[in-house]
Image: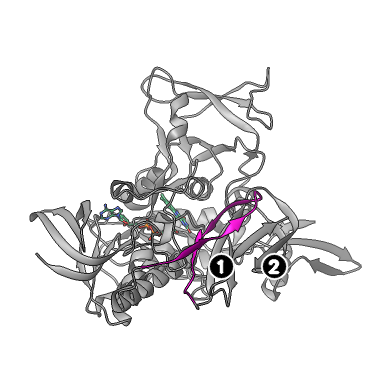
Amino acid sequence: MKLTCIVCPNSCELNIEKEKNEYIITGNKCKRGYYFALNELKDPRRTICTTIKTIFKDKPRLSVKTNSEVPKNKIFEIMQNINKFILKEKIEPGSIVLKNVCNTGVDIITTDEIE
Amino acid sequence: MKEYEVIIIGGGPAGMAAALKVNNEGCKALIIEREERLGGILKQCIHDGFGVLKFNERLTGPEYALKYKNIIKNKDIDILLKTFVIEIKKDKDFHIKIINENGIHILKTKTVIFSTGCRERTSKQIFIQGERPAGIYNAGTAQYMTNIMGFMPGKNCIILGSGDIGLIMARRLTLEGAKVLGVYEIKDTPSGLTRNIRQCLYDYDIPLYLSHSITKIFGKERIEAVEISKVNKNYELIENSKKIIKCDTLILSVGLIPENELLEDLGITIDKKTNGAFVDNDFMSVEIPGIFICGNALHVNDLVDYVSESGEIAGKKACEYIKNKKTNNKNTKVDINENFLYIVPQYINENSNDEIIFYFRSKKRFENAKLKIFLDDKIVEKNYNKLIPAEMEKLTIKNIKNKKISMILE
Ligand SMILES: Cc1cc2nc3c(=O)[nH]c(=O)nc-3n(C[C@H](O)[C@H](O)[C@H](O)COP(=O)(O)OP(=O)(O)OC[C@H]3O[C@@H](n4cnc5c(N)ncnc54)[C@H](O)[C@@H]3O)c2cc1C
């Protein structure tokens, strides 16, 4: 099986083979590629970057992200929750707006400021 | 008339990095930015993946911009927002004509750093004959609508071109509930980064069709469908390959071009390969000394980390230029063979003793490529597992002073 590592700009092309019960991974320039491939096979995860609605005229949308990776198959469920949220007060970048989203243990944090 | 040592045009990542460096070197900088906030295009690039090389973190565009903005805030750097540079004239110094809500003014400066970024190519729109229906956007415009204004450009989208911004928008629109029917690319290789093909298209089962193009657009008020045809290696249409696909939105992601009208007005020649100016390793224009160019205004980078790096070099070199008052930049051209798409800088300042950073792209895909660097009669070799035009490479070379340099890629 072939995979492209998405961890860094090198975009290493990984080659994965299964020998007995072990995965043999080649093509990665660093360890991160090895772990990416393993996770991708067992429990693929991604960060989500999106926006939330605000009540502020000059900034109708504020950018947010998950503060760590979430299971790939929960992405759309999480998006639905984020899209329900409306920000009503000015907060610092990095503030939590949704805690433990969809019971993933992951929080949604803001990635920009409201001036 | 207000006088400056360095005026920086454009407050994106290149301009901000340049300003900080100028400040660190003890010179006085002014940033001129036409928008309301610093940050350039990063303000709308809300996805992550920025700063992996520079900060060893996967930051989003706004986070990357904030890191710089927060440092700039506390430095003695002048900033003019909502201000356009409309003209530059040169005698002994440069005279910069600006316009903002206070009217038109002229500022005098010893050096100018161009960090005006790039804009999106729209040339492909020429295939639209007759009607001009609504629903056709550049990827960057769609990005602005979705991420800054909070509007959805449409529900059933076709993307033409496999540039990175288009790929990123394919994922973004899907996340927001739109259906992206496919990405169509005329070339037989994608234009975007491999990791973006994977995480933006494959993750969401969005098909990528290489060697395909749009040959007709249907719809009067709003786009209703497109006709898609297969093409061969010479981009000629393949008979009987036409297919009509219903859609309400067409997003164009057909590449970026450096923004440099102001440079052309000054009489600076544009390198057809980079669409930017010819510069030496100080990122100084080889035609008009005192003008420095960095970031996407010089050539289109695929990583913001390199954009910031080039801003720092331009900032540092602008200050050295002011302090030494060196005017004769004796330059030698870097010779490259036809397998390069381009190399930047195109010239080397003969007196330079610094290590030199080159950025280059290959013209086509290479497996196990070899780069031979000739420095007078010394040869250095470098191997690459893979080179593709979509991914820029960086190369650092030392001890170049007074040497002839040429490079062969094979
Ligand atoms: C629509 C779009 C989306 C992009 N998305 C990505 C992405 O997702 N990821 C990525 O890595 N790269 C992306 N890029 C590439 C991106 O340009 C670089 O990563 C980086 O932001 C370039 O930095 P810069 O400082 O050179 O230019 P910019 O960020 O473009 O900044 C240039 C600034 O100059 C200002 N300016 C220009 N002309 C004048 C003038 N005459 N007077 C005053 N101000 C002026 C502009 O307003 C702007 O703020 C994108 C580019 C575009 C055009």
* Residue sitting farthest toward the right: A20
The residue segment tinted magenta is B328-352
Element assignment for label 1: loop
- Residue on which disc 2 sits: A39
Compare residues B178 and B87 and report the one nearer the observer: B87
Front residue of this view, candidates B305 and B263: B263
Above or below: residue B183 compared with residue B90:
above
Q: B269 and B96: which one is in front?
A: B269
Q: Amino acid at mark 2?
A: Asn
- Residue at 50% x, 40% y is B254
In which quadrant of the rendered image does the C terminus of chain B lie? Answer: bottom right
Mark 1 Cβ inside 8 Å of ligand 1 = no
| Vertical arrangement, residue B292 with respect to residue B261, above or below | below
Q: Are marks 1 and 2 in contact (CB under 8 Å)?
A: no
Q: Quadrant of ligand 1?
A: bottom left
Residue A43 lies, in percent from the top left, at 68, 65
B277 inside magenta stretch: no
Residue B391 visible in the current orientation: no
> Mark 1 falls within which chain?
A
Q: Compare residues B15 and B106 and report the one nearer the observer.
A: B106
Q: How many marks?
A: 2
Q: Earlier in the sequence, mark 1 or mark 2?
A: 2
**Residue located 23% across and 58% down the image:** B36
Q: Is residue B126 above or below residue A7?
A: above
Q: Which residue carries the number 1 mark?
A: A69
Q: Residue at x 68, y 18 (%)?
A: B239
Label 2 marks a residue whose chain is: A
- Expressed as whole percent of the image width and height from the top left, the position of residue B70 reads 30, 75
Residue B156 at x, y = what percent?
49, 34
The amino acid type of the residue labelled 1 equals Glu
B169 sits left or right of B25 in the view: right
